[in-house]
């Protein structure tokens, strides 16, 4: 995208290399140096490094080696880093802080590897949060994890990938869902509920066994949802082996994405001027790292992107993702395999992925206009 006065800078370090100097670690170090990531940090800052430790069974989450480089850069600036995430709304290996930390350790996130403590920011059972005021279409205040709010600065480290409900998961989603406690995640999922195609349902009970609220039952060989008990987490749609569950209709999904953008705006506003973003466009699976598996990658690995503007950053990653050839052995629809085709809708046909970018831009969180600076 061409540069203009209203565009945000997005730095890009490609993975293609034939030398040790251009390896991923050195590219990450270089991009942090060139963007001057230290500019958001002060001496003795308590600096949250917000990332996703990956669900047990998932193997496409970010390698701890990358987190270590961020930790070292934060320490070099005189700040005090800690790695953090929040507990999940759905059942799994990160529902509470004990299970969450055990999963992180199993995935290599130990002090020995990252040289920083691990803190689950919303407390033992996701009840530690602070309400922060915003002016949005749906919210006048958002619930943010206590220890993220208390931090002086933040580096948001994101594995850019697909997502069944949002189309893609980038920096905005990492802010929105990732900085919210369970009650904040419920706020975002409100009014979106599963729609089960009864003719296609095989009555296996997988959805019922994964529902955190026991809102699904099997009757007469088919799954049925108690909407009053449903919290809209989407876990049933994710685990359904025959893909007969969709989350809401078009209107519901648009509202969900706007609500997500407003939570992201709240987390960004609370740290405005003291937050930087780094996205990794690699291992691009069709689903989030919250899944207990990693499906075949949608595109070849591309590189590392960084910005102080999360909207510009996510837009740059979407554009670069769509510019790649698709993996014919992935979930992608055959019509979306060519360079330039919409890979996000190729994986999730009903995704309204543009909504989160458009609404975040409207809120003043950033701009979709960017200047791509390749290093």
Image (tube, grey):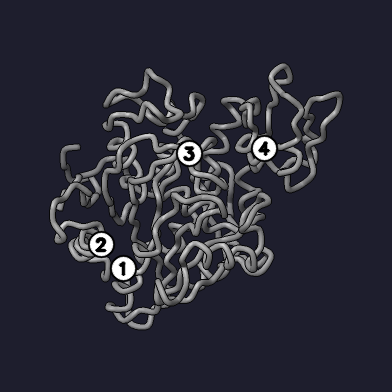
Gap between marks 3 and 2 measured at Cα: 25 Å
Q: Which residue: 25% across, 48% down?
A: 8
| Secondary element at image label 3 | loop
Which dot marks residue 236? 4
Q: Is residue 7 left or right of residue 92?
A: left
In the image, farthest residue toward the right: 220
Please tell me which residue lies in front, 76 or 333: 333
Mark 4 and mark 1 in contact (Cβ < 8 Å)? no
Q: Is residue 79 left or right of residue 131?
A: left
Label 3, label 1: how many angstroms apart (C-alpha)?
Answer: 27 Å
Disc 3 target residue: 295
Q: CA distance from mark 1 to mark 4?
A: 36 Å
Task: Out of 27 and 102, give the one closest to the viewer.
Answer: 102
SS assignment at label 1? helix
- Mark 4 and mark 2: span between their CA atoms? 37 Å
The residue at which mark 1 appears reads as 69
| Residue on which disc 2 sits | 25
Q: Secondary structure at mark 4?
A: helix
Residue shown at the point (31%, 81%) measured from the top left: 78
Expressed as whole percent of the image width and height from the top left, the position of residue 302 reads: 27, 43
Give the mark toward the camera: 4 or 2: 2
What's the CA distance linking mark 2 and mark 1?
Answer: 7 Å
Q: Residues within 10 Å of mark 3 (few under 14, many from 20)?
A: some
Measured Cα–Cα span from mark 3 to mark 4: 17 Å
Question: Which residue is located at x 29 percent, y 72 percent?
Answer: 73
Q: Is residue 248 visible in the rendered structure shown here?
A: no
Label 2 close to label 1 by CB (< 8 Å): yes
Of the numbered discs 3 and 2, the one sitting upstream in the chain is 2
Q: Residues within 10 Å of mark 1 (few under 14, many from 20)?
A: some
Image x and y of residue 37, in percent: 27, 66
What residue lies at 31% left-to-right and 74% top-to-bottom?
72
């Amino acid at each position: 995208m061409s540069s203009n006065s209203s565009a945000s800078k997005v730095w890009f370090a490609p993975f293609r290399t034939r030398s040790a100097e251009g390896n991923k670690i050195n590219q990450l170090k270089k991009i942090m140096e060139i963007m001057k990531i230290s500019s958001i940090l002060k001496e003795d800052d308590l600096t949250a490094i917000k990332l996703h430790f990956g669900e047990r069974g998932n193997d496409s989450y970010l390698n701890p080696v990358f987190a270590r480089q961020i930790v070292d850069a934060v320490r070099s600036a005189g700040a005090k880093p800690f790695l953090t995430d929040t507990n999940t709304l759905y059942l799994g290996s990160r529902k509470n802080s004990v299970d969450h930390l055990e999963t992180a350790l199993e995935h290599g996130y130990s002090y020995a590897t990252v040289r920083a403590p691990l803190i689950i920011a919303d407390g033992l059972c996701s009840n530690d949060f602070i309400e922060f005021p915003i002016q949005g279409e749906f919210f006048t205040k958002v619930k943010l994890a206590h220890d993220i709010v208390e931090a002086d600065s933040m580096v948001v480290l994101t594995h850019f990938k697909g997502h069944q409900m949002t189309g893609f998961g980038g920096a905005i989603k990492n802010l929105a869902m990732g900085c919210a406690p369970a009650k904040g995640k419920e706020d975002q999922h409100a009014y979106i509920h599963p729609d089960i195609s009864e003719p296609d349902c095989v009555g296996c009970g997988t959805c019922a066994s994964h529902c955190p609220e026991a809102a699904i039952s099997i009757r007469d060989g088919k799954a049925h949802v108690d909407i009053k008990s449903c919290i809209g987490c989407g876990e049933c749609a994710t685990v359904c082996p025959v893909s007969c569950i969709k989350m809401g209709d078009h209107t519901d999904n648009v509202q969900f994405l706007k609500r997500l953008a407003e939570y992201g705006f709240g987390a960004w506003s609370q740290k405005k001027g003291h937050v930087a973003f780094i996205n990794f466009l690699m291992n691009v699976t069709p689903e989030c790292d919250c899944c207990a598996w990693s499906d075949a990658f949608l595109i070849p690995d591309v590189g590392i992107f960084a910005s102080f503007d999360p909207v510009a950053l996510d837009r740059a990653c979407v554009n670069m993702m769509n510019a790649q050839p698709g993996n014919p052995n992935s979930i992608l629809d055959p019509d979306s395999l060519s360079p330039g085709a919409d890979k996000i809708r190729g994986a999730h046909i009903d995704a309204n992925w543009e909504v989160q970018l458009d609404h975040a831009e409207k809120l003043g969180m950033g701009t979709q206009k960017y200047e791509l600076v390749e290093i």
